[in-house]
Amino acid sequence: MWVKLCCLLLYFLALFVLARVFEAVAWYESGFLATQLVDPVALSFRKLRTILECRGLGHSGLPEKKDVRELVEKSGDLMEGELYSALKEEEASESVSSTNFSGEMHFYELVEDTKDGIWLVQVIANDRSPLVGKVHWEKMVKKVSRFGIRTGTFNCSSDPRYCKRRGWLKSTLIMSVPQTSTSKGKVMLKEYSGRKIEVEHIFKWITAHAASRIKTIYNSEHLKEEWNKSDQYRVKIYLFANLDQPPAFFSALSVKFTGRVEFIFVNVENWDNKSYMAEIGIYKTPSYILRTPEGIYRYGNNTGEFISLRAMDSFLRSLQPEVNDLFVLSLVLVNLMAWMDLFITQGATIKRFVVLISTLGTYNSLLIISWLPVLGFLQLPYLDSFYEYSLKLFRYSNTTTLASWVRADWMFYSSHPALFLSTYLGHGLLIDYFEKKRRRNNNTDEVNANNLEWLSSLWDWYTSYLFHPIASFQHFPFDSDWDEDPDLFLERLAFPDLWLHPLIPTDYIKNLPMWRFKCLGVHSDEESLETFPDSESDSDSENKEVFSSDKEVSEDDELSTFRRCSEGGRWCGVETCSCANKYCHHEPCERQARSYGSYSSAGDLEPDWSAWPSEMLHCTECVVCLENFASGCLLMGLPCGHVFHQNCIVMWLAGGRHCCPVCRWASYKKKQPYTHPQPLSSDPPS
């Protein structure tokens, strides 16, 4: 996970550098930066009108360019970046969707139950034509959608009873606006009563109702009272301007940030005394002033702080975020980090996508699970101070110059999604190249694996995990309590057919204890051996000589022969093996078989029990072949404590009988160790 996080941070750093490169190229080609101010006098009438439409100011009664230019100057300073964005938005001929309501419940869920937005709904009465024609309605939808106003059409033929109850007997326009200034307050519906059915007149009606929710100040005494008042709002934004009403984007933001930020419009049109404005640091109009407990911030002085809905929305979200904003941000970051697995994972293509799907599911599940306690803690009353300190940290960090650059880059890349995706893909391909090069230098085989090989290995792993009730022994004895593990019982219930046809991997056989059977009084240079074949260091231990009629054979040769056969899926014993279902013709095994014939029988000699593992039961006969243990033969014990010839029990287990021949205890499941009773001095050991 840390590797993916570092790759994601490196990607964000590359985006930041790339944005600065684009700014340098734009400055070199055009000679201006996005933060440079534009003189409205040098702009054409069409560009000035485009700026007014983006800010939400009506210009239908202003036929001359001079009046339009003055209105632009009264609404705020114009930057090159805002002009570029407005012209690009006008050129983009994207169709905006409008909702068609199916009935009362659909209308209630989207319109009346939405407390943080404005809706414009055209109601079409039964057997009546709509109030606004199709062409004008499309223009209206495109115009109001710039300010986050959602639109829809309600046809009374789909629910005539609801229209009668509402009194919608003729076609009309309905506007829904939050009634109170508190979050999640009531919604009021207003009906259009104007006579002129034109886009500009309807838009003026919408902006007038939206602006009525904003607190307006008309004199310096009222401003002084409001400036020094302390209420529930920790963040306030003031607009000092010489306008009849605030711009539409300012009114739309007041609805969107209901309960978080208070919007105040200071109309300085008829002010004679502006001394108090100078006292609080306001020397020019128009000005957008953000008032926080930490101080005053002048909006528009840093990079990307344009006089538009989108720019001010991202600015206020960074200062006063909701929990939902933080959740969406974390969701985007987690998924971007998870998609890095597609490039970090090497090998087959199918393997990459399988790992990606697994990572996406894991990361998103962990994100949702981790957010649940956070939401619960935020509801506790004694965490209000923690919440306030967190917001204070957000306000301090997001009013810096670096934060303004980040917001400007976010708006730039979000308006150009193709560029964002292409840079992400290019960054991922670079990671894939360097990761593949690193693994090839380490001689990793998975780089060259194809799809069929990986699917085959995946199927083997899946069947092993599905049918194997527990993991293989790493060391024996193991400290965990297998008796309390319910995995075997639950998996057998899920697959009842497996009761009759078990398929259990035989890798645990290599971890069972083995040693030599010795008798007291027999001279032998061998010592009892208990080895685990999975440890490569055991083969480097001291080797003991074995007397043979032909030549000496070391124990390392014998164990290596046993290991080679077991890794191939067939188990080689001492005298016989299952490699060819007959006597083994491997040369080391034949030498071992000849060496065992030279040992005398243990029938009249006392076994050396000190060489046996403490958890094994004492016996002198193998119940599989019904023969006594010969001195020097190789023995193997099961978890239940019963002991057999190594070759006999290996052939028994490899044949699919994964249980003890004596007590039927599972050969792969640990049992409580057997404690030998202390014999009396007069009793011989048994």
Image: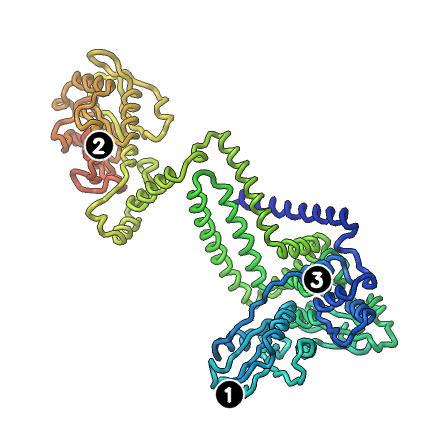
Sequence-wise, which precedes: disc 2 or disc 1?
A: 1
Label 2, label 1: how far apart the Cα atoms are: 85 Å
Q: Position of residue 124 (x, y in %)?
A: 54, 81
- Calculate the distance from the C-alpha at mark 1 to the C-alpha at mark 3: 43 Å
The residue where tag 3 is placed is: 86
Residue assigned mark 2: 650
Q: Is residue 524 left or right of residue 148?
A: left
Q: Which residue position holds label 1? A: 165
Expressed as whole percent of the image width and height from the top left, the position of residue 197 reads: 65, 81
Amino acid, disc 2: Val
220 to the left or right of 252:
right
Q: x and y percent of residue 277 in the render?
A: 83, 70
Measure the alpha-carbon separation of dots 3 and 2: 81 Å
User: 560 or 360: which is nearer to us?
Assistant: 360
- Under mark 3, the amino acid is Ala
Quadrant hosting residue 526: top left
The quadrant in which residue 241 appears is bottom right
